[in-house]
Every structure is written in structure tokens, then in C-alpha cells.
Amino acid sequence: MSATPQEVFGRYIHAGTVTRDADALAECFTEDGVFEAPLVPADAAFPRRLVGRARIRSAMAAHYEQQAKTDRPAPNFEKSGYVLHITSDPDVFIAEIDSVFDGEDGEADTAVCLVQIFRVRDGRIARLRDYFTPALVE
């Protein structure tokens, strides 16, 4: 039995956002999986397109290592939320995500909204298009 959209999404978020584990994140993808961030400029440090589990693993490990060197906070998971939109194609679902980051020193919280389109095969991500503000990864 194939994984549900909720299961696929849950594994992906846990690996990528909660634990920032590049190995676990890569395992969410098919061997030939594709990760795309179409709004990221071609000359940005964050990869715009990654093809294959091995490339996803290495690029995201480098990204997580770079993130660890900054003081960028993790989202507040209690304030953040998402909605999964199931499509007429059983292999495609859309995640609408509102990530909330706590404000510092009395500043207001910051909300970041993004959309991800998932195409799955055999319970793994075959293609992910992640539409987010490029400033998030600068």
C-alpha cells in the first residue's frame, strides 16, 4: 500500500524542517527524484534544481551546515500550520504552508507563506516544486 499524502508530507517536513537531516530528507525522494525551487535566482547559493537522491542529499547537507552557522531561528511549530490539498491525480498533492518565526526583543512574529507541489511515486517524492521567497535561504 502506498503512503498517504499526509505521511509523505509528514516525513518530508520532519526530515527537512524539524531535524534538518539531509540523509532522511534524501530518503523521502525516489532515486531519480527532482527538487526544484523555481523562484530562487539561478546565481543563488541555494540550489534551484537538484536531480537524484544523491545530489539532493549532498546539496541539502551543505545547506543545513551553512544554516547551522547562522543564528536563523527554526519556525515556531505551535504557531505554524499547513493545509494539504488533494488533487484529482492521486499522485499529486499541494501543501499550503504558513511558517511563523517568533519576533525578537518585542518585535512582531514573522509569517512566511509558501506552496509546495508534490508528485509521488511508490510512496516517495518523485518531484517537488517548492515556491518560497528566495530571501529565506540567503
Image (cartoon, helix red, strand yellow):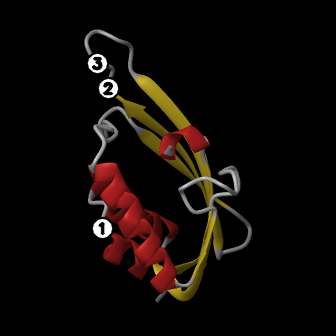
The residue beneath circle 3 is 104
- As drawn, which residue projects farthest toward the right? 88
Q: Residue furthest top?
A: 106
Closer to the camera in the image, 90 or 138: 138
In the rendered view, tell whether residue 98 sits above or below residue 45.
above
Mark 2 vs mark 1: which is more N-terminal? 1
Amino acid under disc 3: Glu
Distance of label 2 from label 1 (alpha carbons)? 23 Å
Numbered tag placed on residue 102 in the rendering: 2
Residue 14 occupies which quadrant of the picture?
bottom left
Q: Amino acid at mark 2?
A: Asp
Contact, mark 3 vs mark 2 (Cβ under 8 Å):
yes
Q: Is residue 29 left or right of residue 35?
A: left
Q: Secondary structure at mark 2?
A: loop
Q: CA distance from mark 3 to mark 2?
A: 6 Å
Residue 77 position, x and y percent, is 31, 41
